[in-house]
Image (cartoon, helix red, strand yellow):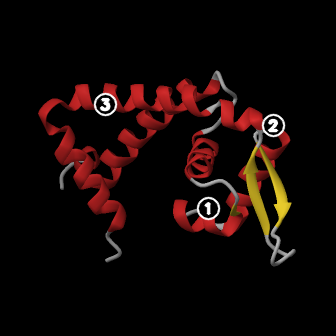
Amino acid sequence: MDRVEDCISFLLGKAGQQIARRTRERLSAYEVTPVQYAILKVLWDRDGQSGAELGTRLVIDSATSTGVIDRLEASGFVERRADDQDRRVQRLFLTKRGRTLQAPLDAAMDQLNAEVRRQLGGQAKAFWSALRLLGENKG
C-alpha cells in the first residue's frame, strides 16, 4: 500500500464518519443520539429487556449502555423497573414519549438508508452484505 487513503481502516473510518454525521443530523431534531436510537429500536422490537440483554444484542459494554440508558431515562424515553423474579435486574420499558418516537426516528433512518442505497446504486446490496460479513468476522 503506497497511500494511507488506500488502507481499509482509513476508508472505513472516513465512510463511518460521514454516515455517523448524517445520522446525528437526522436524529438531533428529536434529541436522540445514534446509540440511543439503537437502544430504542431494540426496545420497540421487545420492550422490557435488561441492560445486559441490550448490550449483548448491540455489542456495547455495560459501562457504555448504562450511561446511554441513564440519558434515555433522564430524557423521559425509558424507565427502569425491577425484574419480577430477580430484583437485582433492572428491566427497561419505553415510556409514552419513547413510543411516540418510533415512527419519526424510523422514517429518518429509512431515508438515510435509501440515500446511501441511491448513492451506491447497483453496488448497494453487495455493500450491505460485505459490511455484515466484516462485522460478524471474528478472525
Image coords of residue 119 (percent x, y): 24, 26
Image coords of residue 71 (percent x, y): 78, 45
| Residue denoted by label 3 | 116
Position of 45 relative to 64 (above/below)? above
Structural distance between the alpha carbons of marks 2 and 3? 30 Å
Position of 74 relative to 90 (above/below)? above
Structural distance between the alpha carbons of marks 1 and 2? 18 Å
Q: Nearer the viewer, residue 14 or 92?
A: 92
Q: Nearer the viewer, residue 123 or 53?
A: 53
Which quadrant: the N terminus?
Answer: bottom left
Ranked by sequence position, the earlier of labels 3 and 1 is 1
Judge from the rendering whether residue 7 lies leftward or rightward of residue 110; answer left or right. Answer: left
Residue type, label 1: Leu
Tell which tag, 2 or 3, sits nearer the viewer. 2
Q: Residues within 10 Å of mark 1 (few under 14, many from 20)?
A: many
- Single out the residue that lies furthest toward the left: 122
Q: Secondary structure at mark 3?
A: helix
| Residue denoted by label 1 | 54
Tell which tag, 3 or 1, sits nearer the viewer. 1
Residue type, label 3: Val
Position of 95 relative to 61 (above/below)? above
Report if the CB atoms under discs 2 and 3 are less than 8 Å apart.
Answer: no
| Residue denoted by label 2 | 75
Q: Is residue 3 visible?
A: yes
Q: Residues within 10 Å of mark 3 (few under 14, many from 20)?
A: few
Structural distance between the alpha carbons of marks 3 and 1? 27 Å
Ranked by sequence position, the earlier of labels 1 and 2 is 1
Q: Secondary structure at mark 2?
A: loop
Position of 40 relative to 55 (above/below)? above
Q: Is residue 7 visible?
A: no
Judge from the rendering whether residue 76 lies leftward or rightward of residue 109; answer left or right. Answer: right
Residue type, label 2: Ser
